[in-house]
């Protein structure tokens, strides 16, 4: 007999349901058991560590950067502590209205508009995403107390003690010292910064950048225990590793000489630059540029400061004109022309040339300044009175060769100097090949001509160089053919003053200079600086230290004449080269020579005091 489902015994249906439910329960139990086993056995250690981490917080303790000192140990840059108002954006309220309300309150306390608060946060996150953003440094204790008493109204806001670069001498040596700022996202990808994190500070210019790895210390770590609300528990500090301060950097600069150069240049009231360097070691005793700036202004620049520092292409206060300038030099270039002509047999030191005041080359006339005729002159006299005609003729003799350019290049013109600072600009030593290529590409109206070499022989025409390269050239003349590598780094010291590393003088290359030719040129420069009608005698005639020096007056298109002066001292066995230039400063003796005089007075006044002190000690 066939039974329908509803005719089956009730017990059978019940057993089936129990079996199904039991099977499902068994499966669920198996899943739960496996999950618990996975959590407790397989991943137990991992979750235990996470649980412990939820009860602890780690804070990086920023290390102070090392000091920067002058050669005598005088502090040029150190640190001061500052209280900084910071915002951790990850802890701000999630609700937009609540977040806005908090930022408005915060802005009122910090004297910032809501717009400025948001802009500062945005800029900070672009530089270092995830790191606390500093809204304002040097906040007062009243603000600190208010935020601490009302912390529930300011989630994510804290006041931290931070180190800020301090410049005891203001703008002194700003272009040499450089600046620091927080590392950017792009910089974090660079190999030299592989161990750094968002919010860390690095050198951005000058010595701060070049010697960053020594100046930057190692951060410390503080780990504390917190409650469920993330608040520190009483006695909750678990571990504290103090930061390791950065090492100190001693520079080759002399603070007194640097101050004299900057004061002398500032007194002219015009843009310009100077450099004073040891001709045997390349140690830079002083180097400066005007206009200058106060590095403090780069820490938190206002919009007005940004416009002043970054957006004025004429004054360009951030540009180091000593290394990044590009100028014709006028007559201080003549030592290179003289050496090239002597070494290549175009002339002898005693050969007389008649200076009639001008020469005619094709349709062009080249004349002395003011058209003055100096009559019969030999090398020494030509340098003393700065006879352009004498050097025009030498340039003309060498125009169809590359001899003048070869000697200029050999002496460092138009090539990288190897300075241990990142700021070194492009320069130009004009050659036949360079101009002919421009003509071939229809970028100039004519090929190379005799006039181009005649102009170059007196430091004019298309020449574009700077005080640093000219200092290297004069140093090579003074030391007999050594091309030194200029540098400002002297040594690295630890906190106790122990020397960890010395930066040894580096000779880039050597070339032969005939001793007789060298002496003849130096004698001519000595006459030019201090004897009779020498072009610099009006400034240096009474200077007690014998020097060899040369004035230069450069014609610069679109500008008034540029003033130059180059000096090797003491004569006849020089140890120091000093060069200054003043844009639109007129004749070399008018503006640049007084700057060099100020520098040399500081150098030899100090040396006289040291000798006197040493004698008294004996």
Image: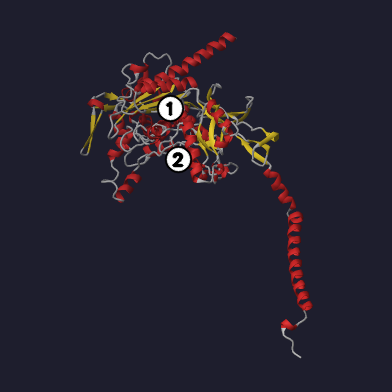
Residue at the image point whose x is 32% and y is 42% from the top: 400
Label 1 residue SS: strand
Residue at the image point whose x is 50% and y is 38% from the top: 102
Query: Residue 391 falls in which quadrant of the image?
Result: top left
Question: Tag on residue 247?
Answer: none
Marks 1 and 2, the one that precedes in the sequence: 2
Relative image position of residue 498 (x, y in whole percent)? 64, 26
Foreground residue, 467 or 199? 199
Asked whether the residues under the numbered discs 1 and 2 touch, taking CB atoms below 8 Å apart as contact, a structural biologist would say: no
Foreground residue, 602 or 57? 57
Which residue of the protein is positioned furthest toward the left in this rendering? 363
Q: Is residue 575 above or below residue 129?
A: above
Residue at the image point whose x is 64% and y is 37% from the top: 231
Relative image position of residue 155 (x, y in whole percent)? 56, 39
Q: CA distance from mark 1 to mark 2?
A: 35 Å
Relative image position of residue 83 (x, y in whole percent)? 55, 29
Question: Tag on residue 119?
Answer: 2
Determine which residue is flagged by label 1. 288
The answer to whether residue 81 is left or right of residue 25 is left
Asked if one can make out residue 556 in the rendered structure from this viewpoint, the answer is yes
The answer to whether residue 41 is left or right of residue 255 is right
The N terminus lies in which quarter of the figure? bottom right
The answer to whether residue 11 is left or right of residue 308 is right
Label 2 residue SS: helix
Residue at the image point whose x is 55% and y is 34% from the top: 211
Relative image position of residue 113 (x, y in whole percent)? 43, 35
Foreground residue, 506 or 40? 40
Dot 1 alpha-carbon crowd within 10 angstroms: few under 14, some 14 to 19, many 20 or more: many
The answer to whether residue 573 is left or right of residue 389 is right
């Amino acid at each position: 007999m066939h039974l329908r489902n509803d005719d089956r015994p009730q017990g059978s249906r019940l057993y089936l349901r129990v079996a199904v439910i039991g099977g499902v329960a068994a499966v669920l139990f198996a899943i739960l058991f496996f999950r618990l086993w996975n959590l407790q056995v397989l991943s137990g250690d991992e979750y235990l560590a996470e649980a412990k981490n939820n009860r602890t917080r780690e804070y990086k303790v920023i290390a102070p950067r090392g000091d920067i000192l002058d050669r005598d140990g005088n502090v040029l840059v150190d640190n001061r502590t500052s209280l900084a108002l910071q915002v951790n954006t990850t802890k701000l309220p999630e609700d937009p209205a609540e977040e806005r309300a908090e930022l408005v309150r915060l802005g009122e306390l910090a004297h910032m508009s809501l717009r400025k608060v948001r802009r500062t946060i945005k800029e900070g996150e672009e530089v270092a995403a995830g790191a606390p953003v500093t809204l304002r440094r040097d906040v007062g204790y009243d603000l600190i107390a208010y935020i601490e008493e009302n912390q529930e109204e300011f989630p994510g806001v804290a006041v931290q003690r931070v180190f800020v670069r301090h410049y005891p001498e203001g703008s002194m040596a700003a272009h040499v010292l450089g600046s620091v700022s927080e590392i950017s996202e792009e910089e974090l990808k660079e190999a030299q910064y592989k161990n750094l994190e968002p919010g860390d500070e690095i050198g951005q210019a000058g010595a701060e950048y070049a010697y960053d790895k020594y100046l930057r210390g190692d951060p410390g770590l503080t780990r504390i225990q917190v409650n469920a609300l993330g608040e520190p528990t009483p006695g909750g500090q678990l571990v504290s590793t103090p930061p390791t301060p950065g090492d100190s950097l001693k520079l080759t600069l002399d603070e007194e000489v640097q101050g004299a150069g900057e004061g002398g240049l500032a007194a002219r009231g015009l843009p310009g630059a100077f450099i004073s360097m040891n001709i045997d070691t390349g140690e830079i005793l002083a180097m400066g540029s005007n206009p200058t700036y106060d590095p403090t202004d780069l820490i938190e620049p206002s919009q007005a400061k940004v416009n002043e520092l970054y957006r004025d292409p004429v004054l360009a206060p951030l540009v180091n004109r000593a290394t990044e300038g590009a100028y014709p030099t006028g007559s201080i270039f003549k030592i290179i022309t003289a050496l090239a002509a002597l070494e290549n047999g175009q002339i002898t030191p005693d050969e007389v040339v008649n200076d009639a005041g001008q020469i005619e080359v094709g349709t062009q006339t080249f004349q002395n300044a003011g058209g003055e005729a100096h009559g019969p002159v030999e090398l020494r006299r030509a340098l003393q009175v700065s006879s352009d005609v004498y050097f025009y003729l030498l340039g003309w003799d060498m125009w169809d060769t590359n001899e003048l350019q070869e000697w200029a290049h050999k002496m460092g013109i138009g090539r990288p100097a190897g300075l241990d600072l990142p700021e070194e600009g492009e320069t130009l030593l004009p050659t036949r090949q360079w101009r002919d290529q421009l003509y071939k590409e229809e970028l100039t109206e004519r090929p190379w001509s005799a006039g181009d070499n005649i102009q170059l022989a007196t430091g004019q025409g298309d020449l574009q160089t700077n005080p640093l390269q000219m200092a290297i050239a004069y140093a090579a003349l003074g030391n007999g053919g050594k091309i030194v590598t200029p540098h400002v780094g002297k040594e690295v010291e630890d906190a106790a003053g122990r020397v960890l590393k010395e930066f040894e003088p580096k000779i880039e290359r050597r070339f032969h200079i005939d001793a007789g030719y060298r002496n003849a040129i130096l004698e001519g420069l000595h006459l030019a600086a201090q004897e009779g009608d020498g072009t610099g005698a009006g400034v240096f005639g009474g200077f007690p230290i014998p020097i060899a020096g040369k004035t230069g007056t450069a014609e610069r298109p679109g500008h008034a004449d540029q003033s130059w002066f180059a000096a090797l001292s003491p004569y006849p066995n020089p140890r120091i080269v000093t060069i200054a230039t003043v844009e639109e400063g007129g004749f070399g003796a008018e503006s640049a020579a007084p700057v060099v005089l100020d520098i040399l007075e500081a150098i030899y006044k100090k040396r006289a005091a040291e000798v006197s002190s040493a004698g008294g000690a004996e």
